[in-house]
Amino acid sequence: MIALVSVVVDVGIVALALGMLLVLYRMVKGPHLADRAIAGDVLAFLVVGVVILLAVDQRRSVSLDAALLVAIVGFAATVAFAQYLGGLTADVEPPEDEAVPL
Amino acid sequence: MTVLREVTTVVFLVSGLGFMLVGVCGIVRLPDAYHRLHASSKCSTLGLLGLLLGAAVHIGTPEAVMKAVVTLVFAFVATPVGAHVLAKSAHASGMRQWEGTLSDELAEDQDDAAA
């Protein structure tokens, strides 16, 4: 039964890596700045998931500290990005050469 | 007892991973950023719940349980706050809704307040 947990951990790391690729696709594609911020938020959560799976694999609780740290940094990044986004008001027109609508 | 613990760990881990992947599918597939916030905040919170409970059951020491609980409390407080701040600032920056969305009650309230 020990093997079952390690199989789940291996499959889970592969699945989370796949999820990171999909989230990176959304981060590249956009189309709005908020989409990229959301993608970064979810990316942080996927990294937290990988760290937790590492802790399960090693059977040590030290890695859970790193999980909490990544979660805090991800939240701070989200709030900082939201502050930046809120500063961009709707009546300021973006430059003509940027095709991406705000 | 060991078998029970392993099975519980596997059930928690699989449910957490499932929630995370459903959230990622929502990020890729849903039509606009407000919908994507819905997918990301709920699914990553519940996914983290499953993964952390699985880790706490598998490791089983008091400090592991303590760290899992602290991380969970932080995630359950911080994720809705982050999603709300992001949605509100996206709305303030004039992000358009998907054309299938039926109402924009924040804009209506702001119009009422301005009138």
Image (cartoon, grey):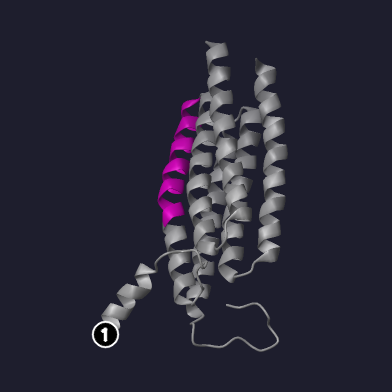
- Residue farthest along the top direction in this orientation: B1
Q: How crowded is mark 1: few (under 14 residues within 10 Å), some or many (20 or more)?
A: few
State yes or no: residue B91 in magenta: no
Q: In which quarter of the image is the C terminus of chain A?
A: bottom right
Of B14 and B98, nearer the camera is B98
Of B54 and A65, nearer the camera is B54
**Residue A78: image location, x then y, percent:** 53, 62
Going 67% across and 35% down the picture, which residue do you hit? A12
**Residue B50: image location, x then y, percent:** 52, 34
Q: Is the magenta stretch mostly helix, strand or loop?
A: helix
**Residue B4: image location, x then y, percent:** 53, 14
Of A48 and B80, nearer the camera is B80
Q: Residues in magenta?
A: B61-80
| Residue highlighted by disc 1 | B115
Image side of residue B104 versus residue B38, left or right: left
Element carrying mark 1: loop
Going 71% across and 58% down the picture, which residue do you hit? A25
Quadrant in the rendering for residue B31: bottom right
Q: Mark 1 lies on which chain?
A: B
Q: Quadrant of the N terminus of chain A?
A: top right
State yes or no: residue B72 in magenta: yes
Quadrant in the rendering for residue A24: bottom right
Residue A66 position (above or below residue B35): above
Going 64% across and 88% down the picture, which residue do you hit? A95
Residue A55 position (above or below residue B35): above
Going 66% across and 29% down the picture, which residue do you hit? A58
